[in-house]
Amino acid sequence: MDWTLEVVVLPVSDIERSIAFYRDRLGFVLDHDTQTPQMRVVQLTPPGSGCSIVLGMSQMEPGSMKGLQLVVSDASAAREQLLENGVEVSELTVFDAERDGGTFFFFDDPDANSWAVQQMAVRAAKPLIPTDAR
């Protein structure tokens, strides 16, 4: 039996601000924005990912998610893209220069939920979700 992680609930204080950050600055795809009298569910997915985030539907404090991780094939290019989009990011950190996967940078969303971005160069040639499956 497969067990897939497909949604992570992200606690935020301002859904509109968070949509603008994740969609417009990070490039996540807005999958849906549904509102009922009882609640609002906003789901966004990073390009190429099988896992999405859902904003606001949580009992956790905004900003309490720490260490969420994205993976890219080129950390330098991803970092530059975020900088160009106005996201404050850390410098590149190389924990292990010998093996693929040892280069990272970090950023926070507007509520201080923290993210790590890991470089896995192998993803350029072997994405987890093949293009034809998207």
Image (cartoon, rainbow, N blue to C red):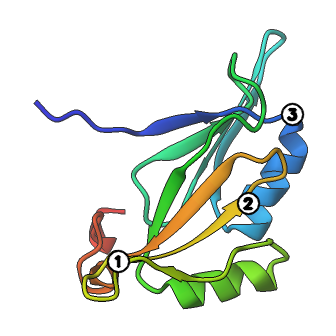
Q: CA distance from mark 2 to mark 3?
A: 16 Å
Which residue has dot 2 on it? 23
- For label 2, count other residues whose C-alpha is less than 10 Å away and answer few (under 14), some (14-19) or many (20+): some
* Quadrant where the N terminus is found in the figure: top left
Q: Residue 57: where, in percent of width, then height?
A: 69, 23
Q: Residue furthest front?
A: 95
Q: Secondary structure at mark 3?
A: loop
Q: Are marks 2 and 3 in contact (CB under 8 Å)?
A: no
Eyeballing the image, is 53 above or below 75? above
Name the residue nearer the viewer: 112 or 8.
Answer: 112
- Sequence-wise, the earlier of marks 2 and 3 is 3
Q: Amino acid at mark 1?
A: Met
- Which label sits in the foreground, 2 or 1? 1
Q: Residue furthest top?
A: 38
Farthest residue, direction left:
1
Give the class, few, some or many, for how many residues have Cα within 10 Å of label 3's Cα (few <14, many ≥20).
some
Locate residue 4: give its quadrant. top left
Q: Residues within 10 Å of mark 1 (few under 14, many from 20)?
A: many
* Residue that label 3 marks: 13
Residue at 72%, 32% (x, y): give it: 11
Residue 128 horizontal side relative to residue 62, left or right: left
Amino acid on which the number 3 mark rests in the picture: Ser
Q: How far apart are the alpha carbons under marks 2 and 1?
A: 23 Å
Residue 22 in which image quadrant: bottom right
Judge from the rendering whether residue 130 lies leftward or rightward of residue 18; answer left or right. Answer: left
First in sequence: mark 2 or mark 1?
2
Give the residue at mark 1.
120
The kind of residue on which mark 2 rests is Arg
Indicate the secondary structure of the residue bearing disc 2: helix
